[in-house]
Amino acid sequence: MESIDSLKDELKQVSQELSSHKIELHQTRGYLQSILQNSRDMIFATEVSGLLISFSKGGEKVLGYTWGSVAGNFIKDFTSDPLEFERLMAASQEEGSAVRLELPFRHKDGHTVYCDVSLISLTNTKGQNIGTIGVCRDVTRWKKLQEDLIRVDRLAEIGRIASGIAHEINNPLAVISEISGWAGAVVSDAKGLTHEDREELETAVKRIKEQTRRCKGITHQLLGFVRDSTPDKTKIDVHELLKETIKFLKPELRYLPIEIIFNFSKEPLSIKSDPNMMEQVFLNLITNAIYAIREEGRNDGKVEIRTKKTDSGVEVSIEDNGIGISEENQAKIFDLFFTTKPPGKGTGLGLPICQNIIKNLGGSLSFKSESGVGSIFTVRIPFS
Amino acid sequence: MSEKSDIKVLLIDDEQTLLEYLSKRLLREEFTVKVTFSGEEAIEVATNDNFDVAVVDLKMPGIDGVETQKRLHEIQPFLQCIVLTGHGSIETALESGQEDAFQYLLKPIDYEILVKTIKDAYEKKLESQNVRFREHVEEIYRSGLGAKGIRKAINKLRKIYGID
């Protein structure tokens, strides 16, 4: 009897322990689940070969796939560098864990997602490897921000170097200009030159003068880019300014099959900004639009200039039905010295300068373009 | 009013080749030209000779354009200075150069514009000189000197102002 009683006691004790373990297990599972459900990180588990056996909600967000569609796949197949991932996996099995920064994954949409990855090897009670846990933090935005910062830095550096060069080139340029002027004077005073020789020499001098003027244009533009002049703000009627700007282009437009369409907002748009700077930007954008139409060789060219009042300022968009910008070039159009124009026609300074000016005025410059269809550039300027 | 040969121009720039050709061109147009390669040299020259217009480069080794201009003004108060500056330094030039230059020109200079500016500067010089001369003359008349004294004083003035 005594033994039955003692067995009963033991059983009771065991069942109590069991239920407390059950509670603990329940709590732990809930804890893990809430991590898996709520963490923005991609957390996954695989068995030894790397087949996915668990995939967190965060993972669904990071890669764009649902758990249902990744289940049973190899996690390495979602990276852009499966070999590197396998190496990392092997390292984690050897060492117990392994970390790799900025490992590229492929999002369902096709774009690349960079993750800081740490892998932890799972072992059973005998110390055998039974799988891997991975915790991956999406650092794509951070990486992009870093790259932008580096690019901005480099742009500023290029600007500084370029302005130094421009200053240095200005001096010999001035000398060349004077010498050619003198040569011109000598030719015009010379006696005994044949008519042909005189003409040859006069043309040569004229050409030198034109080319030095061209250099001068480039150096001045460059120096204008680097110089952070403070805007001289006055009250501007945006519509008036745009119409004035078009007047500059009248001689060029007269012989081109291009229609300029003003699609202005009904109410007058008045802002406080620097009229010269804004005019430079609009002139540049409209000139680009005209160039794009000529490149496309259209005889029904259209440049539409639209204005709109927004909560914080005005929006001016300039749309053309020209050649458009290829996807590849879209990433480069604000780079200093990037141009698709033939030598002598473009400096690759226009758009970076425009962007700089607009930034200086507290606004923004954006664009949309499709190859063969056209481009639309939008300038946003605050009221003051 | 301004026969070019009457206009005496002082050129100051450390870029020697530039001045060599610029001076040839100006001489051909019958300006009277003196070339100097530094502010120091220009000041030395200006203590001995009178000039109407000086063309000064802002950036030079030794004393710079602003300082040169200032000292030239002390020696020859009616001398008009045209200051040549690099891009972007106009503002700095204007700030530091309270010495009222006749005009700031951006380098590389456009020859035609320079010639026109020199002529304009010369007109300004004559004008301000004449105004000042007349003031002096009036002062002399008011001073209550006798006829002889007045003539003497005016002759002295003529000499100072280089008026024959």
Image (cartoon, helix red, strand yellow):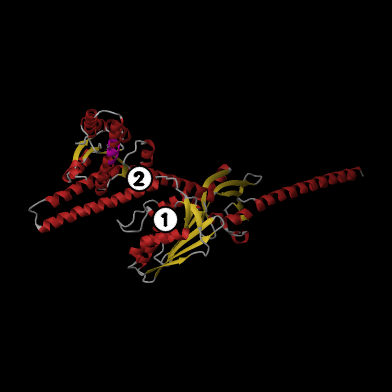
Magenta: predominant secondary structure element? helix
Q: Are marks 2 and 1 in contact (CB under 8 Å)?
A: no
Q: Amino acid type of disc 1?
A: Glu
Task: Please report the bounds of the magenta region as a residue range.
Answer: B127-133
Q: Name which residue lies at 79% across and 47% down.
A: A18
Q: Are marks 2 and 1 on the same chain?
A: yes
The residue labelled by disc 1 is A279
Q: Amino acid type of disc 2?
A: Ala
Quadrant position of residue A150: top left
Residue B130 part of the magenta-drawn span: yes
**Which corner quadrant holds the N terminus of chain A?**
top right
As measured in the structure, the alpha-carbon distance from the residue carrying label 2 to the one carrying label 1 is 25 Å
Q: Looking at the image, which is closer to me, B140 or A136?
A: B140
* Chain letter belonging to callout 1: A
Q: Is residue A272 visible?
A: yes
Q: Position of residue B125 (x, y in %)?
A: 27, 40
Q: Name which residue lies at 86% across and 45% down.
A: A7
Q: Name which residue lies at 39% across and 58% down.
A: A283
* Chain letter belonging to callout 2: A
Q: Position of residue B129 (x, y in %)?
A: 27, 37
For residue B19, above or below residue A114? above
